Amino acid sequence: MKNVDLNFKHEINGKNLVIAIAQDYKTLEVLMVAYMNKEALQKTFDTGKVHYWSTSRNKIWLKGESSGNFQIVKDIYVDCDEDAILLKVKQIGGACHEGYFSCFFRTMSEKDENGFNLVKKVVKKRVFDPEKVYEEKK
Amino acid sequence: MKNVDLNFKHEINGKNLVIAIAQDYKTLEVLMVAYMNKEALQKTFDTGKVHYWSTSRNKIWLKGESSGNFQIVKDIYVDCDEDAILLKVKQIGGACHEGYFSCFFRTMSEKDENGFNLVKKVVKKRVFDPEKVYEEKK
C-alpha cells in the first residue's frame, strides 16, 4: 500500500477527505467531482481505476461498479495546498448516472444586458440510456 | 438578488456550500476548486467576477481581491445533483497564490511496470512572481 500523504482536510460525516475532480484526458471536459478518503485514493493508485468515497452511502465507491462506466487513470495532479486532486481519466461510456458524458450537462447562466440570468438548460446530448445501463447490471 | 436554487449540501464549519470548480474557458485547464455559499454565488452572478466562500477565513472571498488576479465569468455549468458548479472563466494573471496559472501544477503519479508511484513533481511554469504580486497590493 502506497503512502498517500495529502491534506485530507474536508471533514464530512466524520470522514477526512480530499476533493477529487475527474477530467477527460483528451477532450479536457470536466466530468464530475466527488471526494476521496485515503483508502479510496490508495485503491485508485493500486488498480488504476478511480475509487471515490461516497458521502451519501458512507463507503468506498468504485466508479463504474454498477454501470461498467469505469474511469481509467491516466494522470493525477495535486493542488497547491494538497486538499484536492485532479484526475485525468479515460471515461468508459459516460460519467453521469443520468446518461451524459459529463455530470455538468446543464448551464445555469444566460447573459443579457441586465447581467446573468439563472436558467438551467441542458446543453449536452445523452451518450447512453441510463435505464438500460443500470437495468442490465441489476 | 437572483434566486440561486442549488443543493448547498456540503456542510463545513456549519456553513452550507456547493463545490465550485474554475476552468479556463479557452484552454480548458482546470484552475482551482473551492466552495461557494449562496451569497458568494449571488455575488458571482451579480458582478461577473468569481466569489468563493473561504472555509479557512470564514468569509466571502472575491478571487483576485488582493492579487488583482480576478476570474471573469464566461459561463456556469451545474452538475446532475446540483451540489457542484463548473465555472468557465477568463483568468487574469494566474489562479494560484504560488504564481502558477493553475493550482494543479504538480503531478503525483508516475507509472511504471509496478503501477503508479507517488512522486510529487512540478510540471508547470510560474506565470507571475507571487512575492511581487502580493507585495504590491499590501
Image: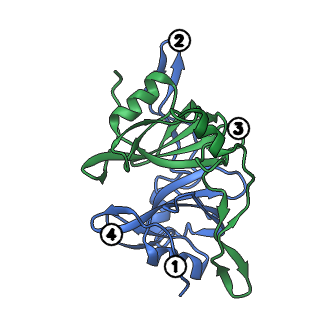
Chain colours: A green, B blue
Quadrant of the frame with the C terminus of chain B: bottom left
Identify the image quadrant of residue B89: bottom right
Residue nearest the observer in this picture, A9 or A13: A13
What subunit carries mark 3?
A
> Under tag 1, what secondary structure?
helix
Answer yes or no: is residue B119 visible. no
User: How far separated are the C-alphas under marks 2 and 1?
Assistant: 49 Å
In the rendered image, which residue does mark 3 sit on? A26
In the rendered image, which residue does mark 2 sit on? B113
| Mark toward the viewer: 3 or 4 | 4
In the rendered image, which residue does mark 4 sit on? B15
Dot 4: few (<14), some (14–19), or many (≥20) neighbours within 10 Å?
A: some
N-terminal of the pair, mark 1 or mark 4, is 4
* Residue A30 x, y percent position in the rendering: 62, 49
The kind of residue tagged 4 is Lys
The kind of residue tagged 3 is Lys
> Under tag 3, what secondary structure?
loop
Do the numbered discs 3 and 1 sit on residues whose CB atoms are within 8 Å? no
In the rendered image, which residue does mark 1 sit on? B42
Above or below, comparing residue A48 to residue B123 in the picture: above
In this rendering, do the residues under marks 3 and 1 share a single chain? no
**Marking on residue A48:** none
User: How far separated are the C-alphas under marks 4 and 2?
Assistant: 45 Å
Which residue: 60% across, 43% down?
Answer: A95
N-terminal of the pair, mark 4 or mark 2, is 4
* Residue A138 x, y percent position in the rendering: 53, 34
What subunit carries mark 4?
B
What subunit carries mark 2?
B
